[in-house]
Amino acid sequence: MSLLSIKKKATGLGAAQTSISALLQGQGADLSNHTIANNLVALESLDDNARTDLEASFEHGSQELNTVLKDTLGEDFRVNEIGLEAAAIALLASGNPAVYAQKAMRVSTESNAELPAFGSAGSMDFRLTPSNEAFDETELRKFAPHSIVFNALAAVQDPFAEAFFPTYVMSPDNAGAEVSVQRTMVFNEVTRSATGSITNFGKVNLVEAVQDATILENQTTALVPVYLADDSRADFFVDTDVLAPVDTKVDGDEFKTSALRVDTQMDLVSLATGPNRINAQIDSTDSIDGRVELKTVYVLVRDAANQADSSTGESDVLEIQVKGLPRTTFQPAAEGDSREMTLTFSNNAVLLANDTKGVDGSAAAALSGLGDNVASVDLKLNGTINVETGALEINASPVRVNGLHDASGTPISTSTGAGKTAIDSFSMEVIGYKLDARLTNANRRTRGILIDRTEVKERYTVPLGAPISAPQPVHGASDSASDLRALITTARTRTSNNAVTTLLNYVDSLRSTVARASATGAAPQVQGIGRLLVKPYFQEETIDAKAVINSTKSHEKAADFSAVLVDAIRQIAYKMMDRSNYAAALEMETGGTSVKPKLIIGTDNVIAQHIMVSGDERTASIGMDFEVVSSPDSRMNGKIVLGFGRGASGKPDALGFGTHFYMPELTSTAQVSRDNATTKETQVQPRDLHVPHLPVLGVINVSNIDAVFTDYIGGVPTRS
């Protein structure tokens, strides 16, 4: 770097400070004054008019600063919208810097969620009280241009940190950082316990229904006949000696049911009520929905011995599923009552063999006389139902064998010989049926699936960082631009380090908590408010470059290694998206809009070059947006960390990996006596915090890269 370029960069910061000083002298009262600064630190309590005025001052200040910073800093420094926002807040604070500094220095811990500042990746130098040095209003106001430029540049993180933790600029009126999520919870009607014990409402996040279809299954209006324990309804059901009632659970209600008896008149709506099913106080306003369908037919099969003496021989009940077949639905009657519907079911292709199973799941012994042959039988049922009164009756015609075939499909005569013997060996009759019917709920008797929108908030203490000081001789020449450059560089470097520290400590946390919870089946309790929207997920894999690369040519090694990395990233990323239910949560958050998840790929500077293959983005992702960011931090060497994010959304995002909370800081220079020596120190004490929200991470540990990509050119080892 030439001396000329060094001077150019130094004067860039100095020129920015000079231009901002001129701006404050010329428009100071318009850009910031006591009223504006006082409103800034009391933003939460402002009325609409005061808030509107403050927003106008903020916009005006942002525009002026944007012009000044672009003109003076040029391309030497990068100022983005985040930096400009932080600088504008510092500008507004210059109207009464002492009040701002006092407010910003106060750290509230009331009702805040504490975040771990320590872990295997290191700790962060946070403190809850400011440094001992105090500056009066004159000093703070004097260094307002210094503070504005500092915040414009120090608030901007490196690309790695910003990808995982987009910056959110806080105003000093915030007692702490706050993140909230709104969840749509679904549950069924719950009857409170009369014992006084706490009732579990069984609320489930709607997002989980995308993977579990049973969550939204609701049979509140289903008409399922209830068999009462006192046998008072026995006449309407198939004899219990032939077909025993079975336990069932419908919409959380547990009771016994069975097949309805043919050739019997009954009230279907009445039969579907009971102590644990539907409201017993049904009345004339309850009616049946127009779609009623025959679902199951029960046929009693008896061999010859059982026909002669029911205490001997074999008898079986066959459960024949007919739902969905032609002519199984009731149709409006052609004549008569408009509320009456009729059934004319006929099927001549019901096949029976000696391995046909009965309701108990075993082969029907009563059909053993068929041998290896297959019988085709006719089933015919006719009936009526009145959807207003619930009056139901279904009659069955005799079951008739219409054909017999051997195992090869060859027809066999049923009028003589072995064929006649086979069909005469058993008899059949329809004894019962089940319907698929439900109430219209036109009277709103039941509420079905209940929806509840809940909001959950978490607050985080945003602590003060350790101060950063640039000491100078008391009587020496002052180089304000150089001091400012040093403060900015130090603050940004520390911010980047803290981002990596937080990320790797979070990896350790998920590695232990999510894996342990998966082994026990319990829901993991992890840090990050995103756990309320997705299922926490963590996967870690190891790639030994030397073991997976077999090529001998350098260009083939590079291509093969890239393919291995890209494939591993793709596999883990899609498992992260699927197992955590992230895509469903993202779709619901965006109102059903099809939004591709954005994958953040964080790694070191060496591995990054192998992920982006010849600039072809398609190799790194299929159907998923992605961003590759690298960090020079040695703790990231040999690591690939995968997470999801949505970039800077203007506010903390529970479906983004994390947030960097940053509060603009005022700088000042003071003469300090310490250890019998007096120095002049320019000091800043940043206040920021990296908070992970989304407990969904993948980690790939890559080893032996150097062993694969080390060639010898002229005896000198080089890394490809």
Image (cartoon, grey):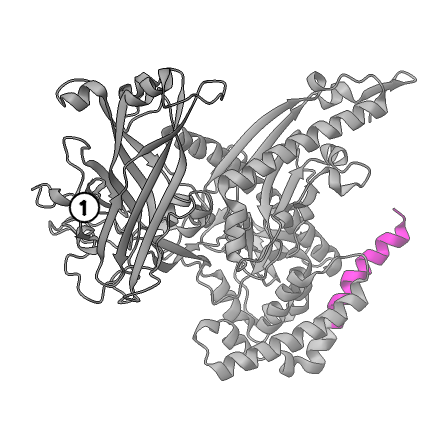
Question: Where residue 285 appears, x then y in whole percent?
Answer: 22, 67
Say above or below: 386 vs 217.
below
Magenta range is: 1-19
Question: Where residue 368 appears, x then y in whole percent?
Answer: 31, 17
Is residue 293 on the magenta stretch? no
Secondary structure type for disc 1: loop
Is residue 9 on the magenta stretch? yes
- Residue 362 visible in this rendered orientation of the protein: no
Say above or below: 279 vs 257.
below
Query: Which one is nearer the viewer's eye here, 546 or 402?
Result: 402
**Which residue was labeled with disc 1?**
226
Question: Where residue 538 appears, x then y in whole percent?
Answer: 51, 35
Which quadrant of the figure has residue 624?
top right
Which secondary structure dominates the residues rendered in magenta?
helix
Question: Where residue 271 appears, x then y in whole percent?
Answer: 18, 51
- Kind of residue sitting beneath label 1: Val
Query: Which one is nearer the viewer's eye here, 301 or 190?
Result: 301
